[in-house]
Image (cartoon, helix red, strand yellow):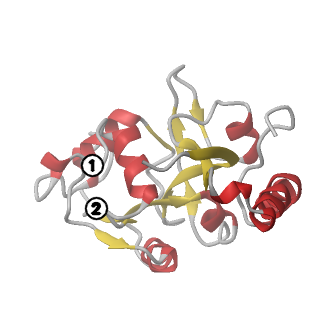
Amino acid sequence: GIEYIELPIAFDALTVMINPKNNWVDQLTVAELKIVWAPEAQGKVTSWKQVRESFPDKPLQLYGARSDSGTFDYFTEAIVGKTKSSRGDFTASEDDNVLVQGVENNKNSLGYFGLAYYVAREQRMRAVAIVNSKGAAVLPSVASVTDGSYEPLSRPLFVYVSAVAAERPEVRQFIKFYMTEGPSLVAAAGFVPLPERAA
């Protein structure tokens, strides 16, 4: 029953990551990611070869966000088609550093997390190009998120302000700061700024 104002502030790109020593994956389709992450894959899809016949018979080591995370919600909706619908037998953490270390330390790993964590560590892991709805394999980047080609794994981020709280001068001042200074801070934090027209 709370009236609120929704303010878009940035975009994020969920990045599918593999270990740099993985020499068999160059791109993945949404359908292949669904083979890996769907609930029915639990305990059954355990090898890379089950994802694509040309991949080696090596064990899949999976890393992802915990089920109480917005990243988990968005990834499952975009890949499996239903929010919170995922296999449960993977290393899940709310600490992205745990996921980063898992991918870095395991040649057979596959994980996902926000673009900012990849950008900060791109020398130590490799992003996978995702085949979009037009059939193009696209890597996550500021440019591919801004032009809309990195889909379906890019998403807008919002802040929600209570309409009652927005009447308070200090809250209005904070919102104004968010909307005027936010774009430069967003980029510094590793997220993708809104296109100038949208901002």
**Which one is in front, 195 or 55?**
195
Q: Residue at x 57, y 47 (%)?
A: 4
On the image, numbered disc 2 is attached to which residue? 60
Q: Give the amino acid at mark 2.
A: Leu
Pair 1/2: label in front: 1
- First-in-chain label (1 vs 2): 1
Q: Is residue 65 left or right of residue 34?
A: right
Q: Residues within 10 Å of mark 1 (few under 14, many from 20)?
A: many
Residue 54 makes an appearance in the image: no
The answer to which of 178 and 121 lies nearer the viewer is 178
Residue at (53% x, 51% y) in the render: 14
Label of residue 36 in the image: 1
Instruction: Tell me where residue 158 appears, x and y as whole percent.
Output: 62, 50
Discs 1, 2 touching: Cβ within 8 Å: yes
Q: Secondary structure at mark 1?
A: helix
The x, y position of residue 136, in whole percent, is: 57, 26
- Coordinates of residue 172 in the picture (x, y in percent): 79, 58
> As shown in the figure, which amino acid type bears the numbered disc 1?
Val
Residue lying farthest to the top in this orientation: 134
Seen from the viewer's position, the closer of residues 49 and 160 is 160
Q: Secondary structure at mark 2?
A: loop
> Would residue 27 appear left or right of 77 to someone viewing this image?
right
Question: Residue 144 occupies which quadrant of the picture?
Answer: top right
Q: Could you say where residue 199 lies in the image, as x and y percent from the top left? A: 82, 40
